Image (cartoon, rainbow, N blue to C red):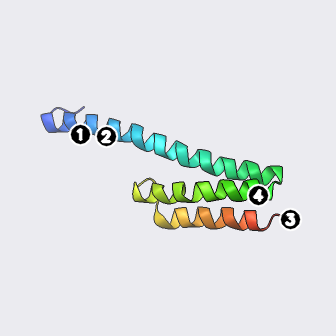
C-alpha cells in the first residue's frame, strides 16, 4: 500500500488515467465492431462508411497511447482488406 504523499497521489492519478484509457479503448472497439457487423451483413457501402469513421478513431488511439502505431495500422489494413474483398 502507498505510504508516502507522492505515492498516494500517483495512485489517484493512475486510477483517473485508467478510467480515461478504458473509455477510449472501449470507443475504439465499438467502432471496429460496427465495421465487422457491416461486413457480416454484406452491405459494402455501410462497411465502407463504418471503416471511414473507424480509421481516425483507431489512429487517435495511437496518439493517446492506447495502442501501438503498428497495431493500429495492422487493424486498419486488415479491416480495409476485408471491406475491399466484399462482393
Which residue is depicted at the point 61% across and 49% down?
31
**Cβ–Cβ under 8 Å for marks 1 and 2:** yes
- Residue 24 is left or right of residue 48, and the answer is left
Q: Counting other residues with Cα less than 10 Å from the Cα at mark 3, is it few (<14), some (14-19), or many (20 or more)? A: few
* Residue 30 in view (yes/no): yes
Secondary structure of residue under mark 2: helix
CA gap, disc 1 to disc 3? 52 Å
Q: According to the image, label 3 marks what residue?
A: 87
Residue 10: image x %, image y %?
A: 23, 39
Mark 3 or 2, which is nearer the eye?
Answer: 3
Q: According to the image, label 2 marks what residue?
A: 14
Mark 4 or 3, which is nearer the eye?
Answer: 4
Q: Quadrant of residue 49?
A: bottom right
Q: Counting other residues with Cα less than 10 Å from the Cα at mark 4, is it few (<14), some (14-19), or many (20 or more)? A: few
Mark 1 or 3, which is nearer the eye?
Answer: 3
Q: Quadrant of the N terminus?
A: top left
Amino acid at each position: 500500500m502507498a505510504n508516502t504523499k507522492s505515492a498516494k497521489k500517483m495512485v489517484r492519478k493512475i486510477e483517473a488515467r485508467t478510467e480515461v484509457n478504458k473509455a477510449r479503448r472501449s470507443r475504439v472497439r465499438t467502432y471496429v465492431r460496427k465495421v465487422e457487423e457491416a461486413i457480416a451483413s454484406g452491405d459494402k457501402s455501410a462497411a465502407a462508411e463504418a471503416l471511414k469513421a473507424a480509421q481516425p478513431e483507431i489512429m487517435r488511439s495511437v496518439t493517446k497511447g492506447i495502442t501501438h502505431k503498428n497495431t493500429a495500422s495492422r487493424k486498419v489494413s486488415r479491416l480495409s482488406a476485408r471491406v475491399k474483398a466484399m462482393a
